[in-house]
């Protein structure tokens, strides 16, 4: 939601404890959440982050089992070993850490490196900054968070803002030598963000800006979707853009 990063920063500024955990108003934790995730941080001084898998709920608050399994697979947690990972840049590149499904050491996060234009990408950026600290991450495969998926109910404004923020964040991540082994994965996701941003801009009739994003996506990861979107910026009638 708009302002979520501001709320996150404000919460960090108010936090006085050793550890921080974030919970959005429409998600919920398992009663075991802190009991499972805090002890690894206590046992392992090198650990700066402890995170778990999670359930996906539909908008009625009911667990969607197929979507949950697909989500675990999509974000690289299905094959992730339980326990400590150090370094954990691969976990960051695969976006395996759900921000509301983790506990992290407050002093390990350099808040000043969360730039305002990171926006909706702050969750991935936070796990990246924690990885840069040189510490370890602990993973529990137990599902300890119930995350409400909003899907199409999110506004196009929010979707576009999220895509543009992800583009800025991933471009900066690509400059870090620590992420070189995961460059191809980051580029593929960067290309997707460009295509999604371009598609939304095209629906709004902003052809030149849409073309720029779609061309960038096409260069990074040539796909039929990117090519079709780029071609549409030239030939699609204005009357049909809103339905694309």
Image (tube, rainbow, N blue to C red):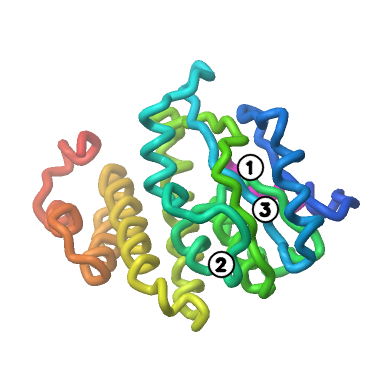
Q: Which mark is residue 100?
A: 1
The structure residue drawn at horizontal position 66% and vertical position 30%, both measured from the top left corner, is: 30
SS assignment at label 3: strand
Q: Nearer the viewer, residue 50 or 174?
A: 50
Q: Which mark is residue 50?
A: 3
Task: Give the mark nearer the N terminus: 2 vs 1.
Answer: 2
**234 horizontally vs 77: left or right:** left
Q: Residues within 10 Å of mark 2 (few under 14, many from 20)?
A: many
SS assignment at label 1: helix
Q: Position of residue 190 (x, y in %)?
A: 37, 63
In the displayed structure, 76 sits above or below 141; it is below
What range of the chain is rendered magenta?
A: 1-10
Q: Disc 2 designates what residue?
A: 88
**44 horizontally vs 97: left or right:** right
- Determine the CA span between mark 3 and mark 1: 11 Å
In the displayed structure, 111 sits above or below 101; it is below
Task: Give the mark nearer the N terminus: 2 vs 3.
Answer: 3
Image quarter where the C terminus lies is top left
Q: Position of residue 31 (x, y in %)?
A: 72, 28
Q: Residues within 10 Å of mark 3 (few under 14, many from 20)?
A: many
Q: Which mark is residue 51?
A: none
- Determine the CA span between mark 2 and mark 1: 18 Å
Q: Nearer the viewer, residue 233 or 51?
A: 51
One can see residue 126 in this view: no
């Amino acid at each position: 939601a708009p302002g979520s990063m501001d709320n996150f920063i404000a919460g960090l500024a108010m936090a006085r404890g050793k550890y921080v955990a974030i919970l959005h108003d429409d998600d919920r934790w398992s009663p075991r959440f802190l009991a499972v995730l805090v002890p690894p941080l206590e046992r392992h001084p090198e650990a700066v982050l402890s995170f778990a898998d999670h359930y996906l709920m539909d908008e009625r608050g009911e667990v969607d089992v197929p979507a949950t399994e697909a989500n675990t697979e999509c974000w690289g947690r299905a094959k992730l070993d339980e326990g400590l990972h150090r370094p954990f840049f691969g976990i960051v590149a695969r976006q395996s850490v759900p921000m509301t499904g983790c506990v992290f050491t407050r002093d390990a996060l350099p808040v000043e490196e969360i730039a305002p234009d990171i926006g909706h990408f702050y969750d991935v950026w936070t796990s990246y900054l924690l990885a840069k600290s040189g510490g370890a991450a602990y993973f529990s495969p137990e599902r300890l968070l119930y995350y409400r998926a909003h899907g199409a109910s999110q506004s196009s404004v929010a979707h576009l803002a999220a895509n543009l923020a992800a583009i800025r964040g991933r471009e900066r991540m690509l400059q870090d030598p620590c992420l070189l082994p995961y460059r191809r994965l980051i580029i593929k996701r960067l290309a997707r963000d460009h295509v999604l941003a371009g598609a939304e801009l095209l629906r709004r009739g902003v052809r030149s800006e849409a073309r720029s994003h779609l061309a960038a996506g096409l260069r990074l990861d040539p796909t039929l979707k990117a090519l079709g979107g780029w071609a549409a910026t030239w030939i699609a009638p204005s009357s049909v853009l809103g339905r694309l």
